[in-house]
Amino acid sequence: MPDPSVGPGQWWDAFSLRGEVALITGGGSGLGFGIATTFVKAGARVVLVGRRKQVLASAVQQLGSAASYEVCDITANDEANTLAALISRQAGPVSILVNNAGNHLKKTAVDTTEQEFQSVLDTHVLGAYTVTRAVIPAMLERRHGSILFMASMTALFGVPKVVAYSAAKSAYLGMVRSLACELSPHGVRVNALAPGWIKTPMMLQALESEPERKERALSRTPMGRFGCPEDIGWAALYLCAPAAQFVTGVVLPVDGGASIGF
């Protein structure tokens, strides 16, 4: 049963996002779109942020009137405050932030250049940090907010040829714990998801070109199948909803058991 402090109403109110404004970076496709879909179903006002206007516009058309978008490159760090202010004027103060935007690099450590390594860190770590910093003041002022980082299995166990990506996602875990300790006393919860192999176009394209890798991924996933973007969306909904009002600083794997499989 939900804690009575969630408020009066039916039990499913504990999973409602009515009245919330969610900013989702990289929300036009893949996992970000899966999260946006579930958030809209739960009653949130969703603002998608990304670099590709056409992709964002198509996503908003599918999501309906509860969604809008802003074109922004989160690596343009000096634009984060402007973005937060713009969304606040148009949709309301951001009460949920999902740091989902990212880039990927598959190379051996020896072949990964300093510039490539830095690019991955700039997008995942510094980009997420500047957007997070931009929305924190309004959350603290209202003593209400939820910040979610999209971590990865690469932050939980070793995966070859993704040293830059693994470093970036591992940095998220430290950010989550530190921010949770700093912000949670003031009504702002901070958590992370660690997705497993999820059927996004990017993952499917990568695995179809490497049948052996596909079989290896399935063989080490106890549930014996890949997840779908809405699996991540429902987990994100839980962590950002009143149902998780006493949950902060956690990293929740959504991976069919891959992180504990053998």
Image (spheres, rainbow, N blue to C red):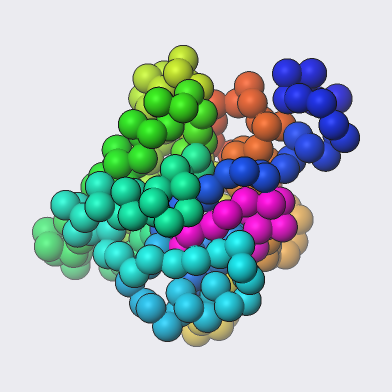
| Magenta stretch: includes residue 165 | no
Residue 26 lies, with reference to residue 122, above or below; the image says below
Q: Classify residue 81 as left or right of residue 24.
A: left
Tell me, yes or no, if residue 167 can be seen here. no
110 or 141: nearer the eye? Answer: 141
> Residue at coordinates 60% horizontally, 39% vertically from top-left?
240
Q: How many marks?
A: 0
Spot occupied by residue 59 in the image (x, y as percentages of width and height): 54, 75
195 or 34: nearer the eye? Answer: 34
Specify the quadrant of the image occupied by residue 5: top right
Question: Among all residues in the image, which is located at the extreme left?
Answer: 114
Q: Classify residue 141 as left or right of residue 131.
A: right
Question: Among all residues in the image, which is located at the extreme front?
Answer: 89
The residue range painted magenta reads 37-48
> Residue at coordinates 32% horizontally, 48% vertically from top-left?
85
Q: Classify residue 107 as left or right of residue 190.
A: left
Spot occupied by residue 75 in the image (x, y as percentages of width and height): 23, 58
The quadrant in which the N terminus is found is: top right
Q: Classify residue 171 as left or right of residue 251.
A: left
Spot occupied by residue 192 in the image (x, y as percentages of width and height): 50, 40
25 or 151: nearer the eye? Answer: 25
Residue 161 lies, with reference to residue 153, above or below; the image says below
Spot occupied by residue 229 in the image (x, y as percentages of width and height): 63, 64
Tell me, yes or no, if residue 205 can be seen here. yes
Specify the quadrant of the image occupied by residue 87: bottom left
Question: Among all residues in the image, which is located at the extreme top?
Answer: 185
> Residue at coordinates 58% horizontally, 54% vertically from top-left?
45
> Residue at coordinates 48% horizontally, 24% vertically from top-left?
143
Residue 85 lies, with reference to residue 66, above or below; the image says above
